[in-house]
Image (cartoon, grey):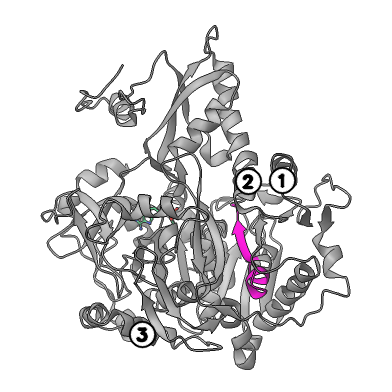
Amino acid sequence: MASTDKNKSVNLESEIFNPSKEIIEQAYIKQYESIYKRSIEDREGFWAEQAENLEWYKKWTTVLDDSKPPFYKWFIGGKMNIVHNAIDRHLNTWRKNKLAFIWEGEPGDFRSFSYHALNREVSKFANIMKSMGVKKGDIVTIYMPQIPELAFAMLACAKIGVAHSVVYGGFSVEALAERIMDADSRVLITADGGWRRGKIIDLKSIANEAMMRSPTIEVCVVVKRTGNEVYMETGRDFWYHDLMSLPVASPVCETEVMDSEDLLFILYTSGTTGRPKGMVHTHGGYAVYTSTTHKLVFDIKEEDRWWCAADPGWITGHSYIIYGPLINGSTTFMYEGAPNHPFPNRWWQMIEKYGITILYTSPTAIRGLMRFGDAWPSRHNLESLRILGSVGEPINPEAWRWYYKIIGREKCPIIDTWWQTETGGFMITPLPITPLKPGSATRPFFGNEVAIVDNKGKEVAVGEEGMLVIKSPWPGLARTIYKDSDRYREIYWKDFKKHGWYKTGDSARIDKDGYIWIIGRIDDVIKVSGYRLGTAEIESALVSHPAVSEAAAIALPHDLKGHAIHSYVILRAGLDGSKELEEDLKRHVSHELGPIARPETVDFVESLPKTRSGKIMRRVLKARALGHDEGDLTTLEE
Ligand code: WT7
């Protein structure tokens, strides 16, 4: 469905949805063009003005240091802490008693925390980590289900100047072990499990196995979530609730003074090579970027109840469940489980119950709920919703229209935000006042100049496909890849070095109105249900199975997931493929990387198309699978 829609996008350009008078009247930004123009002419002035909305222990002296591209720095000389802005500063205002967090567990249990209560939880856990000797320069790995303690742990780290590395709870043994080792983490925070579709995901067993492969962990803190029986190693593993009742867990804890450019977190994301990249984000620029984009793009008002239905284990959750909303003093909602459990009305029920005003989710979730029909949402009062959002992959117009009509009752603008782990926050996105075209992320956010170019850097004509680049730095840009600056330079900045542009890895086209239509990745990154995976990671998981000698993975269109993984393996000499082995290989990938990486198909083959230098030509496999022309095969070895 996604692919057929894409081919029709030329006609779609004329389908326009204008915002209602009410939406325009409420909006902070009433005119895009003039503010955009100003933000480009005086980029530093624009960002300095936004940074004034935060509290700084000491103000910056220079807005942007671009003396060593591509290593840009922002708000130089500024002293701050993102947690001071996300929590502390609200405590001196009436927001102290405003709800910061509302959370519902999959079994239906719920908890909520005011800013005052959030501060106590975070401070207590921060004091525990301090007493364990965790200090600035350390990176704590967090591997948790979607429960409030995940947010407490992240914020507690940032408060005491320690970096966090959150590993998505849907990842498995090898993915976790590799990330722990890359970060040299001494502390791991996890849980005895989480609920998903009525079943317990046993995170602690996965963590145990990962800790055997990655010996750096000295202390493992375990939150009791499910009551699932787990193995606890004496001297290494401690229950969170035991620690939180110790006298050292005082609810008073000073927030560490940090430099703008000090490390806030690393977050691993997939690329073209096997090793995941630890993207580095820092306190100052990231705080300014996430809070500004959250507030202006979604027109956040004091009384909003904001629900970003992503997992905090991905950048979307970091930026728009935790940091952006809390800096803005919003009430942010978090849900633990599956959207269709026990019934497909679970989300609509919670929107009604909590009076959610803005829902921000992914095309894959929308498609997944759409397939159950209109009756499920129609049973609920969704009047509280005023804005809807989408992220993760291009939204196919069919899903867009359903979301707009059935969930938004034709009153809510759909904010289709294009961005990446690397960008920290929204880059191309409508504002609530923007006339919308289903399937287009519309225009660049303030301060950002983008272009669609050919491989020489020349802008392509209207309607033509090209590479999406960003021409100028912004405060949310990842500073580097952890421990690998060369790779950072190589992946993002080498191809357009002469121009100084950031290469996004996406292809796109622009229409006659200047609207941008994202097509998809041009590298070996796959988006499965909006989750980012590298073909190389899947291939190395396959090859780690004793029966496999070589493997290739590609993405093919899939109605619900957007794309699904298809794999090809060459078995070791003397072995034959079978249905059982196919199942076993799928299980193996799922065990090593996580269920999202489980291949849809495993084909046993005798050879793989390769270039003479030995690189697998995935494009050939893809063309064959789709029955398309295989293109230029002159470099093929096979
Ligand atoms: C890739 C980045 C940023 C939060 C979630 C994903 C794709 C993201 C959109 C969108 C079309 C999109 C791109 C991008 N993507 N948002 N609105 N329309 N494509 O972050 O995991 O780093 O993935 O997701 O291909 O490069 P991520």
Judge whether residue 366 can be spotted in this image.
Answer: no
Query: Residue 207 has which mark?
Result: 1
Q: Nearer the viewer, residue 264 or 620?
A: 264
Query: Residue 159 has which mark?
Result: none
Give the x, y percent position of residue 337.
61, 54
Under mark 1, the amino acid is Ala
Q: Quadrant of the C terminus?
A: top left
Q: Which residue is mark 3?
A: 26
Provide the residue span drawn in magenta.
154-167
Q: Is residue 7 above or below residue 147?
A: above
Q: Is residue 527 above or below residue 74?
A: above
Under mark 2, the amino acid is Leu
Q: CA distance from mark 2 to mark 3?
A: 44 Å
Q: Which residue is mark 2?
A: 176
Under mark 3, the amino acid is Gln
Q: Nearer the viewer, residue 137 or 603?
A: 137
